[in-house]
Image (spheres, rainbow, N blue to C red):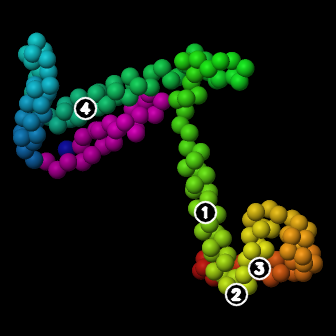
Amino acid sequence: MKIRVLYEDNIKNGHKNYTTIEIPDGDYSVMLDIDYEQRLAEAKPEKKAEVKRCETLQEIFDLMNANEYNHWRRYHRHLGNPKTPYRKDDQAEDETDVMDTFADNSQEIERSNQYEYEDVCKWIRKVLGKKEDWADMFIAVRIDGMSIREYASSIGADENNITQKLKRATKKLEQEYKNRQI
């Protein structure tokens, strides 16, 4: 028996995308009875006579799908046509400001970028090993974007010397990266 289930994550712009589940054939009377008893208990006293027992599992899931979709629709129905589409700096913020409804995951992105940066720096330091000044130089110039002239003047070294060390460090890192890929 195949049953179609609707999850809230599968509702895209008001369109239902069902997930089909294959259930082995068997006796579902216990599940049908439990569902009927639960819906009967949740119904208002004057509506108890209208509650009917489902005959198949698909009917149960159709009821759940309708409830899930209605819940999603109730929450999202007004987000499509905001009265004030965007807040302008020269206007006072009012209650219809829609910008507050958009998710702000900028801190998560910043943390993710910081973790990635730290991992790359750790790998560079590991590969270049004893040449710690090469690692610092490579990170400052190639990753942090400092110019060679700036870096050379900050440590009091010659620009040509820094350029040659950068070439050697880059070559060593490329070799290690290629070996890691194989």
- Circle number at residue 134: 3
- Residue 63, horizontal then vertical, whole percent: 23, 29
Residue 145 visible to an observer of this rendering: yes
- Residues marked 3 and 2 touching at CB (< 8 Å): no
Residue 143 vs residue 52, the one in the foreground = 143
* Residue 52 in which image quadrant: top left
Bounds of the magenta span?
A: 2-25
Q: Amino acid at mark 2?
A: Lys
Query: x, y percentage for residue 108?
Result: 55, 49
Q: Closer to the N terminus: mark 4 or mark 3?
A: 4
- State the separation of the CA atoms marked 1 and 2: 23 Å
Look at mark 4 in the image and give the residue it sits on. Answer: 64
Above or below, comparing residue 134 to residue 45 in the picture: below
Say which residue label 1 marks: 116
Q: Nearer the viewer, mark 4 or mark 2?
A: 2
Mark 2: few, some, or many residues within 10 Å (few <14, many ≥20)?
Answer: few
- Give the spatial CA distance, label 3 vs label 2: 9 Å
Residue name at image x 28 percent, y 38 percent: 4
Q: Is residue 29 above or below residue 47?
A: below
Could you say whether the residue bearing mark 4 is in a helix, strand or loop?
helix
Is residue 13 inside the magenta stretch?
A: yes
Query: Does residue 17 belong to the magenta stretch?
Result: yes
Query: What residue lies at 59% left-to-right and 50% top-to-bottom?
Result: 109
Residue visible at 40% across and 39% down in the picture = 9
Q: Pointers 1 and 3 in contact (CB under 8 A)? A: no
Q: Earlier in the sequence, mark 4 or mark 2?
A: 4
Label pair 4/2, CB-CB below 8 angstroms: no
**Number of other residues with Cα within 10 Å of mark 1, as a class: few under 14, some 14 to 19, many 20 or more:** few
Q: Left or right: where does residue 101 sit relative to residue 122?
A: left
Q: Extreme bottom residue here?
A: 130
In this rendering, which labeled residue sits more in front, label 1 or label 3?
Answer: 3
The answer for how far apart the CA atoms under marks 4 and 3 are is 62 Å
